[in-house]
Image (tube, rainbow, N blue to C red):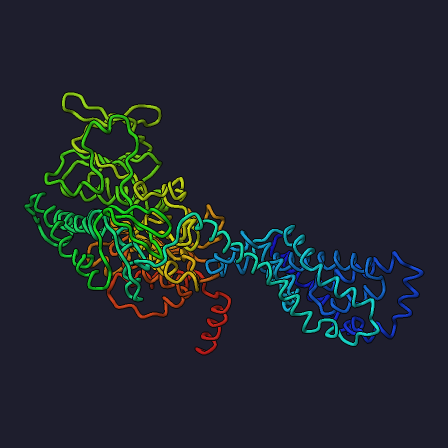
Amino acid sequence: MNKNVSRAVLVAAVAVLAYLFFAFDLQTYLTLEYFKQQQRAFEAYYTENKVFTATVYFLIYIAVTGLSLPGAAVLTLIAGALFGLGLGLLLVSFASSIGATLAFLVSRFLLRDYVQSRFGDRLGAINAGVAKDGAFYLFTLRLVPLFPFFVINLVMGLTPIRTWVFYVVSQLGMLAGTVVYVNAGTQLAQIETPGDILSWELVLSFTLLGIFPLLAKWVVGAVQKHKVLRAWPKPGKFDYNLVVIGAGSAGLVSSYIAAAVKARVALIERDRMGGDCLNTGCVPSKALLRSAKLLANARRAKDFGFKRADIEFDFGDVMQRIEDVIKRIEPHDSVERYTALGVECISGEARITSPYTVEVNGRSLSTRGIVIASGGSPFVPPIEGLDQIEYLTSDTVWSLRELPERLIVLGGGPIGSELTQAFARFGARVTQVEMMPRILLREDEDVAQLITARFEAEGVRVLTDHRAARVEVEGGEKTLVCVHDGHEVRLPFDALLVAVGRRAHTESLGLAALGIEVTRQGTIETDQFLQTRYPTIYCAGDVAGPYQFTHTAAHQAWFAAVNALFGGFRRFKADYRVIPWATFTDPEVARVGLNELEAREAGVPYEVTRYGIDDLDRAIADSEAEGFVKVLTRPGSDRVLGATIVGAHGGELIVEFIAAMKHGFGLNKILGTIHIYPTFSEANKYLAGEWKRAHAPERVLGWVQRYHAWRRG
């Protein structure tokens, strides 16, 4: 019997039992009035048949609670009246816990898959909280009689809490209330309604008892906060409300927010304002890619109706243009601009000397809060002989003024792939070396295959499954020796660009003296509020991880700054539910949410809808008819789990799917939105149309067809 049939059978069984309960008016037998009328008869029968009576009562109690029927409170009173405090407490405690667990399991079996599949993206934080502290919260709810227990049973069944944890915690948590009710049942003659048991004083007492664990948790947190800070002298007054270390994306946004809410803020930068993004990352790389694409389009002159198009260029001029682009954007991130906003900008090496102080240029700054946004730098692996040559990284490649004839790019991630294509388009003979089975490993295989094919068509030699073993220099000839299938492969080169990832800047911050831990990935250990072990020190950007994008650094900066400034009143958990990114190869690769690879690894059920951009009118008109839009949705739903776009302007086109995931609308709404013709954005609408056709109500359409035939006569 498959799961759907089992669900149907269970729903039918529960419905029939509930119907019989109400149809035969069985609830009248679970009232105080009925029991009082029959109390002597029940007591007499119990005296003659103790085991049988207790067993039947036990099973009835389980059935009532398991089916979430009314009457459990009265049954608890009856236990005290009929069996006494000891046996009554024993029967009710186990029967109520078993019945609650049955209701929990029914809810889990019938509804959890549906709820999690439909709303899982919004329930991520709740699921994580339950997985971590579910027993604690369940125990608190069980202590408070204001929460209907049957609701708790059904709701907890939708969460990832383990069944045995639910049972044990329920039995312990309900024990205090069970004692009160069973004991009250021993004095049944004085009780007219169940409400007579719980006076407002008793309800208040239980509520306070339930709140106590929450208060205790808060107190423990406060004690831990005091404990971690007590070793450090707290200044009587502070120079600043916030000191931000690092003037990259995260640092600039953090200081901007602090200044906007009129806090006194200092921004410390040891190198250049704007950080990696402005000076060595996003801005220069996109300027380089734009120039490279112009050359690529010239080589495709026939695709645009021209016999030929030759472009004469000097590579040094191209690199000079990149410097000019940086200078034009620099004012956006300049000392002058941020000073005008109210930020005190300090040039120097920052070192955190206590949870309240930062030292820079021999000066100690006292501050209420600190945001570490010190960024990162290219990671250079320990390859034998690499130190014998002047290798390039994404930081130093911009100093080139002559195009290398033979270039090896070590790394198949986004940075390595972007620079690989750019240099190949300028005329360098580029070999891309990747130790994994394919480039762009985080993307789906069809994405990597398309980009690899484009690279090879443009003259790039892509070598996957090649591990860089050593660099040799002999007679002025430089060679990278790789290992592939157990054999050595020798690759001579003129320049070697290392682009295998990035690592966070943490070495000079004084973290070890403060006991602030660094993860295996090199980032600083933080909680969900981006707080370190100290409640005064927060992180954002590359040093916080897990994403190392400019836009996520800015996103984290809001949480870090607001929590550092206003955490005494309210703190906000960093929200990573909808994180997009793009790799700016040609065609571009843009993504948000899950792809097929991640969905399979996570065991998330999904449907795939795909639309080929080669069919798009605007793409054909622009001779950019390559790539696809691929969207994952929940089975039977138009809600977007994730989207991948490979094609021209993919980084812009993905925004519609980002909005859909962030704000909870689906493909039907995208289909119903007017898209300008002819534009690339129509690809998203056509994708939604493909989904709609695949989910057309065939039976209804069959009846509609018959209706139209009838209308024709």
Q: Is residue 705 above or below residue 379?
A: below
Residue 433 pos. (x, y %)? 27, 34
Of residue 83 and residue 166, the one placed in the foreground of this image is: 83
- Residue at image x 32%, y 53%? 581
Of residue 165 and residue 495, the one placed in the foreground of this image is: 165
Residue 611 seen in the figure: no
Q: Is residue 207 above or below residue 94?
A: below
The extreme front residue here reads 236
Residue 200 pos. (x, y %)? 67, 73
Of residue 152 and residue 304, the one placed in the foreground of this image is: 152
Residue 463 pos. (x, y %)? 28, 34
How many numbered dots are placed on residues in this image?
0
The extreme left residue here reads 312
Residue 583 seen in the figure: yes
- Residue at image x 35%, y 36%? 437
In which quadrant of the rendered view does residue 554 lie? bottom left
Of residue 54 and residue 63, the one placed in the foreground of this image is: 54
Horizontal arrangement in the rendering, residue 62 relative to residue 49 (left or right): left
Horizontal arrangement in the rendering, residue 375 relative to residue 163 (left or right): left
In which quadrant of the rendered view does residue 380 lie? top left
Residue 310 pos. (x, y %)? 7, 47
- Residue at image x 83%, y 69%? 187
